[in-house]
Amino acid sequence: MATATRPPVFAIALLSACVLAYEVLLTRLFSIVLWHHFAYMIISAALLGYGASGTALTLLKERLAPRFAGVYLTAALGLSILMPATFLLAQQVPFNPLELLWDKTQLPKLFAVYLLMMLPFFCGGLGIALVLSRFGKEAGRIYAFDILGAGLGSLGAIGLLFLLPPHQVLGALAALALLAAAVAVIELEMQPRWLLEAILGLAVLAAVALPAAWLQVRPSAYKDLSQTLNIVGMRVAEERSSPLGKITVVESARIPFRHAPGMSLNATSEPPPQLGVFVDGDGPVALTRFDGRLAPLSYLGDLTSALPFHLLERPRVLVLGAGTGNDVLQSLYHGATAIDAVELDPNMIDLVQKRFHDFAGGLYSRPDVHVHAAEARAFVNTSNERYDLIQVVLLDSFGTASAGLYGLSESYLYTVEAFQSYLASLNRGGMLAVTRWLSLPPRDALKLFATAVRALEQSGVANPGARLAMIRGWKTVTLLVKNSDFTAAEIAAINAFSRTRSFDLAYYPGMRADEANRYNLLERPDLFEGAMALLGTGSEDFIERYKFYIEPATDDRPYFFRFFKWSAAAELFSLRGQGGMPLLDWSYPLLVATLAQAVGASVLLILAPLALSRCRRTLPPWPAAVYFLAIGLAFMFMEIAFIQKFILFLSHPLYAVAVVLCAFLMFAALGSWLSGRRQGAGENGGWVHRAVLIIAAVALLYLAILPALFQALIHLPDAAKIAISVALIAPLAVCMGIPFPTAMTRLSLTAQDSIPWAWAINGFASVVGAVLATLLAIHLGFAVVILLAVLMYGLASVAFRGFSRTGKSLPA
Amino acid sequence: MKRHSTLLAIVCLCFALPAQGDAFETARHKMVEEVTADAVFTSSYSGRATLNPNVVAAMKKVERHRFVPAELASYAYLNRPLPIGYGQTISQPFIVALMTDLMNLKEGDRVLEIGTGSGYQAAILAKTAKAVYSIEIIEPLGKEAARRLKSMGYGNVETRVGDGYYGWPEAAPFDAIMVTAAASHVPPPLIKQLKPGGRMVIPLGAHFLTQYLMLLEKQVDGTVTSRQILPVRFVPLTGGH
């Protein structure tokens, strides 16, 4: 081994890239194995391993420091082995999140998963903290390479996920971590020489020779796909994977799929042969056989979503979230003249257009059907076309929706601003039709109705009630929002359509109470009463008194699927014996639990060991602790909030995350590097104050001008929008890269032993910050999250004065 | 020595078995009391102050612990759903009681069940109706349930493994049908196989989480109405409507 004289910055960049790429990959893997929000929960806990590494380093510093190179190499090798190993072991833990509220033994199982998943992050964090601790004076340069690697890693992972299935990316990351170890061997001039060759050999083996069976991803037995494959004769006909999701097409030799969601009880027809299509194991939606004849599609006329076709003559239709094309078929069946179908996932389009072209009857290649691979909202925002009907039908599976698993997902499809955009894209007399699963007591339907009322009011419509109609089947609800008043003939058509199919009228202009609740009886006509209350003068009081959260979602608070209210939680929990549990929208309590667990585990794993050991003597001065906490939280707040702000502008959630995250990290790296150079040139702490001032000014300016700016520029080509986004983020991110390394360098001069403490506090703040930002956004909106970030940077600036004055001045 | 240990083990087992059986019986009665107490408000849809006595009697008799995996037998009499393998669950006893109650069964009734699962619901139905026909789509589950029901002496239950969409035409029409398998729509052939005046019950929701129950009634004239029933008494507006 050798005595290092320079920090292994390229190895640090690679190590950091690995850890970030692994984090992105785990989101995918756990979405396939479990459900998305459990992925979020597990990863936020796993990241605590990062902070815990700082603690371990502090406690073991005297033992580890003399063996710097060896420990660093072990950490990198450990990361390589543990990334695949811990994930595969975690899959063996019989944790079933669906039993979490019933079964006390699930909690220890969940903790076992947490502990396992922390290990690779611990190794990655240890490597970086070790280098920062040893070469503290070069913190600016090290931190620059660290976050540069992080940026490239997150971008690289998204790229890799387009090329390889997730389990193969796991193998590739193991190889990359070995490469990081090999680069460290070179940078640290380690001996013996065969070490380098051995590690490179292992890297090649990991990349190409890891048996696929070892890396197998095993979805929960409770996922829809797992259950379907238990049926004799079911077989996977095709699989496609990308960062947008894993699509599995299943066909059955014996028992056909028959997907006709909420079909009228009066219907006598059956769907034609179908294939089942699952995304991340959830579903299925159907890919329906189409031979050009419309008669076999008659079942599509018996769904609540068919209502608008009975009010419009040969409409021009826009289908948002077209998926496998059932809504396109429904439009064709009802005589639509032209259909624009928008689908986010190109893999889905490709399956219908090419792989199953013959089965789908060339549906997506017809001259009257135009398919667009785009995000729905962005398509509407950027398109100049006008439609008679915009259809948004059942974009989430019934099981997932009814289990309340979406509460934390942002959705820009069902916001007040979205409804306004849709209405603006309609021809005179055109309609927006939104269909959702029926939930009881009503949640989605009333929130949709409230959103439509708010959108119409904000568009200056004096009497929104004249433009709304809603019907209810036994399983689905369809809301119509028209951009002019409903006519008497249209109201008659709504009545006739509903009556012949035994669907219930929930609302139409002039509806009487006794017309509600006739066919699919509820204890009370909740939907009609709710709709009337939402149109009345006491609507705000009704929303307030309703036990589910039905306040309309906005672009600043895009949480349509959040229905949870604390005031009803205790009552529902007490009714669990009587079947009250499913009414708890439990993804929100899980978010709070995630925050509590992040705080609790941080205290237990990061802070308590330090406080209880002799390291308490190396505690940083309290202003330094406040400083690192504040900048850690503020960085996460800014990053998360601006990703959301750019999503609509960049037209694609994935590109927004990739571009914004990468730009933030790259320019923060630049800021970090600049701060290192300035400090080398004798610059004192004034940079931090100036950086904070610029952050505050730019963030506040963006809050004021971004909406108008985005609106003006949204029609530009993607490349231009990406360039503009990067340019907008650059000044903010450069300044955000300055505070951490500047203060680290200060500490290296004034309180060298406190550096691991600072690392631990920053690790804690990053994890807690990510969860807290989402929680704050749900309640207060992303604009407030940005304001809070500005305040925290201000606090950091004040705290910096506190500890930068206590130390020696920097050498010139 | 070995022989002595074996003998001791057999003796212990002989004493333990009845003791455990008693414990199960006590637990079962306690569970039924809980379920009955929770169901006091069923009058809003059944017109009775409490559960049908036949349903209560069936719940007291059917040994739920024999329908769950052996390692979960000790949880069998908790009022909660339990996993039975293949990603399937045995419903919460409260929901089982409620669904059976909703079917309003009489002694001579013939019942069709789609989704046998472990066979517990079929056993409850067998105690409250004359004949039960049950179809399971997952082969190993269906075979295991058939073996279990037979060994437990449920002679009035006929089982079949296969597609439930077309019901059981040879045994149709039925007085009541229960569809415990997830379905995107109610299969028209099942509605056809329901007698006029018959009832169909369908639980809706995800695994472990029954959102609401649908009660479908076929009128004498052949028309169909449905009722969406929330198993829990929960008024969604503070201060009531």
Image (cartoon, helix red, strand yellow):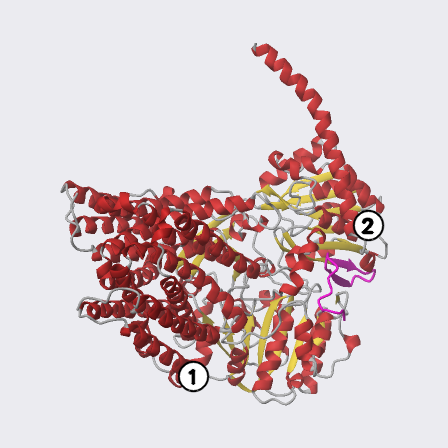
Give me the residue at 70% from left, 20% from top: B14
Q: Do labels 2 and 1 share a chain?
A: no
SS label for mark 1: helix
Position in image of residue A724 (x %, y %): 32, 79
**Chain of the residue on which disc 1 is drawn:** A
Q: Which of A243 and A130 is in front in this view?
A: A130
Give me the residue at 29% from left, 54% from top: A753
Count of marks, rendered view: 2
Q: Give the range drawn in magenta.
A: B215-241
Q: Mark 2 points at which residue?
A: B51
Position in image of residue B91 (x %, y %): 67, 47
Within the image, what quadrant is residue A260 found in? Answer: bottom right
Amino acid type of disc 2? Leu
Within the image, what quadrant is residue A214 found in? Answer: top left
Give me the residue at 70% from left, 80% from top: A538
Position in image of residue A233 (x %, y %): 52, 46
**Chain of the residue on which disc 2 is drawn:** B
Q: Name the residue under label 1.
A: A704
Dot 2 surroundings within 10 Å: few (below 14), some, or many (20 or more)? many
Give the alpha-carbon distance from disc 2 to disc 1, as whole Å.
62 Å
Within the image, what quadrant is residue A22 found in? Answer: bottom left
Checking the image for residue A599, the label placed there is none
